[in-house]
Amino acid sequence: MAVKKEIGLAIIGCGTIGRIRAILARDYPGVGWLGLCDVNRELGEQLKADCAADLFTTDMDELLDRPEVNAVIVATDENNHGAPVLGAAERGHALFIEKPIATDARVSLRILEAIEKAGVDAVMGYTQRFRRRFLAVKERLATGQIGDVHSVVTRAFMNRMVPIATVRRTQDRRHLTPMVVSGTHSLDMSMWLMAGKEPVSIYARSNERVLSAHGTKDSTFGVFEMDDGTLFSMNISWALPEIWPGSVYGLEIGIVGTKGVIDIEDTHRDLVLASDVAQGAGYSPDGFSPGAPRHVDFLTSYPPGDLHMDQLWGPMREETVSWYQRLCMGQETPHATARDGHRNLVLTMAMDLSARRGGPVSLPVDPKELMAED
């Protein structure tokens, strides 16, 4: 079938995730033009050579103003999504935004309003929606296989390489918390699986005995009440030792309905490697060292996927290629929307607010309230 629309793609941010998506763009026949932008010229020029991009620039506006561009991937650091997303929306470009949509709830709302006013198609980078196991669960829930869901328990475990690598890039660490940066993935998954249920309150607590030296928290545990009485427990700790075998994410979800239950064990402990050879860091941005050798690894626990024949195989490939198909062919896809992304940020920040206050927070909550106690 012929391509209905050729993509002129701009990628802003040439780090780990921007690189993955750029390499996939190089190999996708519907991408007719590719431009890159990053504040780090050396990093960007290297990626330009590796993916045969048509342009690299350190000037975001120069790239967004190119007549070839009609779609934009924003893969900058978490604190810096606002300007490129707003710039792309103002120009009418389709958007792929890495999570979180912002680290300020007021900025997130402004971004959402700009996207909806411009009428652009904007999706969020919640890669786990593209894994076979979660798509199978989504289908069983959508077809009523366990009846009406009334109880959900979600637990995420991560070693501390991700928070250390994340916060080292900025001094603005107030909202680079376990929930906002990483718990957002398991929260998005749970909310997606509970589609149609709206949270009305959250009670959460946090601690920070290990990672306070790095300016962030260790763990956050919370309980949501939904508008129909459903209870949703959402827990994350990203303070496990660097030598913890999970490269990044280990997730467990239990979903109980009136007619059945679905129990998801996604810890990757079914595929274990032990070796005299150090395995390095699963998440390894430019210049980061894990600080301790890892000789045991839960294979397939790096969320984007795994390398073979110099290609990435796994959910990030599925997610990225699916977005290119969405643009080229108009296909419906499971991507999270910008509205999903704003909702996820507000809920994760509401958990942090409840933990700071030591009491429940009613939902929905005004973004100004979330930011008022900084």
Image (cartoon, rainbow, N blue to C red):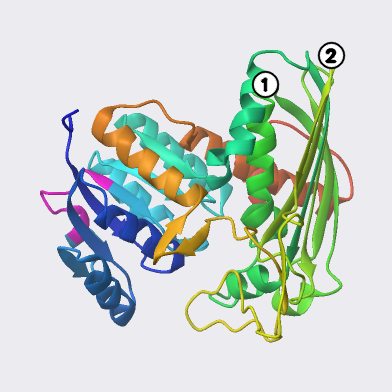
Q: Magenta stretch containing residue 208, yes or no?
A: no
Q: Residue at x 71, y 79 (%)?
A: 275
Residue 357 is left or right of residue 176, and the answer is right
Q: Residues within 10 Å of mark 2 (few under 14, many from 20)?
A: few
Q: In x, y percent, where is residue 151?
A: 85, 27
Residue 51 is left or right of residue 204, and the answer is left
The image quarter in which residue 24 lies: bottom left
Q: Are marks 2 and 1 in contact (CB under 8 Å)?
A: no
Residue nearer the viewer, 144 or 335: 144
Q: Is residue 146 above or below residue 15?
A: above
- The magenta segment is 63-71
Residue under numbered circle 1: 140
Residue under numbered circle 2: 259
Q: Amino acid at mark 2?
A: Lys
The quadrant in which the C terminus is found is bottom right
For the question of whether residue 170 can be seen, the reply is: yes
Q: Residue at x 56, y 81 (%)?
A: 288
